């Protein structure tokens, strides 16, 4: 079993209107030292052991086809093997 954490954010070249709105609110609160805020999506996925595909191949396919709009967004993920308890 694997636990996978997936982070999806807009690419640097894409305007992030939600991030800009939050940055404006943060500045109005007096935190002028904050230069940029990017908003993203976070997913936790549990993956059973694979036989014909690696976990990486499975996650890449899911991200490319469903979780991220790869034209506008980039993603990264962390895979953690979970010890099975008996």
Image (spheres, grey):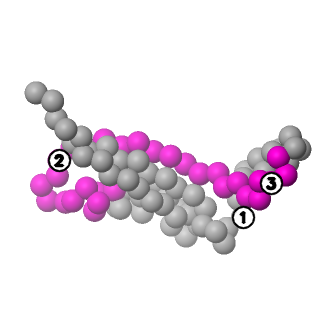
14 left or right of 26?
left
Q: Which residue is mark 3?
A: 33
Q: Which residue is mark 1?
A: 15
Q: In the rendered view of the protein, which quadrant contains the C terminus?
A: top left
Q: Quadrant of residue 9?
A: bottom right
How crowded is the residue under tag 2: few (<14 C-alpha within 10 Å), some, or many (20+)? few
Pointer 3 or 1: first along the chain? 1
Q: Which residue is more in the foreground, 20 or 32? A: 32
- Asked if labels 2 and 3 touch by Cβ distance under 8 angstroms, the answer is no
Point 15% across, 30% down: residue: 85
The percent position of residue 8, horizontal first and vertical second, equals: 52, 55
Q: Position of residue 24 (x, y in %)?
A: 84, 50
Inspect the magenta stretch and tell me whether residue 7 lies in it. Answer: no
Which is nearer the N-term, disc 3 or disc 2? 3
Measure how far apart labels 1 and 2 are at the Cα level.
Answer: 38 Å
Q: Residues within 10 Å of mark 3 (few under 14, many from 20)?
A: few
């Amino acid at each position: 079993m694997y636990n996978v954490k997936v982070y999806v954010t807009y690419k640097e070249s894409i305007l992030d209107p939600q991030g800009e709105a939050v940055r404006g609110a943060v500045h109005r609160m007096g935190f002028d030292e904050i230069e940029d805020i990017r908003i993203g999506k976070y997913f936790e996925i549990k993956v059973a052991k694979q036989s014909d595909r690696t976990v990486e191949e499975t996650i890449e396919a899911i991200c490319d086809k469903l979780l991220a709009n790869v034209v506008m967004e980039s993603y990264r993920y962390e895979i953690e093997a979970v010890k099975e308890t008996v």
